[in-house]
Amino acid sequence: MNSKLVTLVHISNFVLSTIVYTMTHLITNIKELIGITSKPILIGDEMKELPTIKNAFLVIDDGLIADFGTMDDVPSNDYNQITDVPGASVLPAWCDSHTHIVYAGNREQEFVDRINGLSYEEIANRGGGILNSAKKLQETTEDDLYHQSARRLEEVMQLGTGAIEIKSGYGLTTEAELKMLRVIKRLKENYPVAIKATFLGAHAIPLNFVKKRSKYIDLLIEEMLPQIAEEKLADYIDVFCETGYFSVAETIKIMQAGKDYGLKSKIHVNQFTAIGGIRAAD
Amino acid sequence: MSVDHLEVLLPEDIEILKKGATIPVALPSCSYFLSIPYTPARELINAQLPLALATDYNPGSTPSGNMNFVVATACIKMKMTPEEAINAATINGAAAMELSQTHGSIAKGKVANLIFTKPIPSYGFLPYSFGSNQIDKVMLQGKFLRKQETKGST
């Protein structure tokens, strides 16, 4: 008796959800539907193939791709919406796996300095570069930082990006790194984009730690990481493994600490020099 | 999970990458903006490694988040074919974020995140016409974006 009742309730819930949520959308006359694959990754020569269907249809159901094929085979159903797109080709939205879009202000002045002959490294050595961004970010409120970053996210959405990874690393204090990661979390909640968050506290050694760099690494591992894990603010950990930033040994130490908190590694490596950082990722 | 940048690569680095399970990620807009070498995409792909493309959007070395420019620059400067560049910017980018079960290609059950182009003769026209916007509309999670959404503007 009871089990029958439960079944009935389940059925009525199912029917209700079907009525309320199902939203089928048929797209017709796509000139070329591009990037058809079920493989999870393309390796080496596999990347040379980009399967397509010409003169295609696509059905979307509840925000997911439900069906596709050639126009000759459009299933005859009652669709909630039909959009005809003659002339348009359709491809998967871009998946941008490496960004730092949460930042404050800009570094237009350094851009001009470089035009006038200074190198990226020289600018960094003069307290510009990442440390300049860190100073600006530390002085910016979380709300202001959110709005500046949201504008950038909206911009790249219009440019076709539908999944994005965003790194911290312009905070370089516990408070400011957490501020950045909380902004990423808010973006994730408010926009229809898949977002992955990466903790990049090891982006640069802050000026006040230059003479005691191991203390900064301790801070990163002993203070920042536990709080980030506690609030579940990051999916990955990243380190700028580069001459003048973090050594291979430091990189391995930091990535291991991240791993202990369940964060997989990403790594900035061989941007300017090859110091053996790829070995660290292995 | 991924190793990013790789503008300066030694032969032994490729050997190490071949043994590991990490995905190399190239950031051509950074090379462009800083006038530094481009990641040797051909060597990586010919070594039967996967490769992803990303923007590196940041205030210092890449103040641009335009993946269309990244794809074009990968073709123009890194000798990637349009097929390779589009794959690197979609399914392999998704893989570098562990999202390729739900994103990055046209497959049943995946999230309807789609780019609708203006009329173009073929997909090779996307990188060929670098700097021109060939996107007519964008759909994310099954809904068309309104052009110029300004929720976050201050």
Image: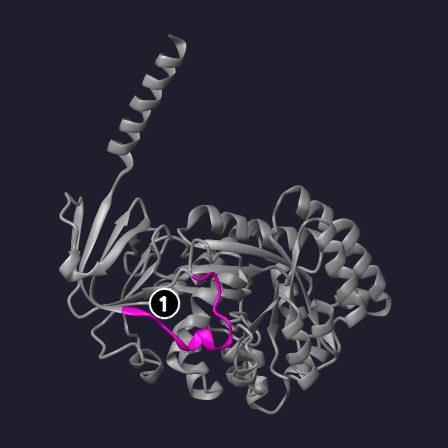
What colour scheme has been applied to the protein in the rendered image? one colour
Name which residue lies at 26% across and 78% down. Answer: B122
Name which residue lies at 62% across and 65% down. Answer: B21
* Place of residue A191 in the rendered image (x, y in percent of width and height, measured from the top left): 41, 51
Find residue A172 and report its image quarter: bottom right
With respect to residue B29, does B57 lie above or below?
Answer: above
* Place of residue A282 in the rendered image (x, y in percent of width and height, measured from the top left): 70, 68
Q: Tell me the element at label 1.
A: loop
Residue B8 seen anywhere in this rendered image of the structure: yes
A226 vs B33, left or right, is right
Name which residue lies at 67% across and 79% down. Answer: B15
Find residue B14 and report its image quarter: bottom right
What's under tag 1, amino acid-wise? Leu
* Place of residue A33 in the rendered image (x, y in percent of width and height, measured from the top left): 27, 66
Q: Estimate how packed mark 1 is, as few (under 14), some (14 to 19) or many (20 or more) residues with alpha carbons within 10 Å.
A: many
Residue B66 seen anywhere in this rendered image of the structure: no
| Residue highlighted by disc 1 | A159
* Quadrant housing the N terminus of chain B: bottom right
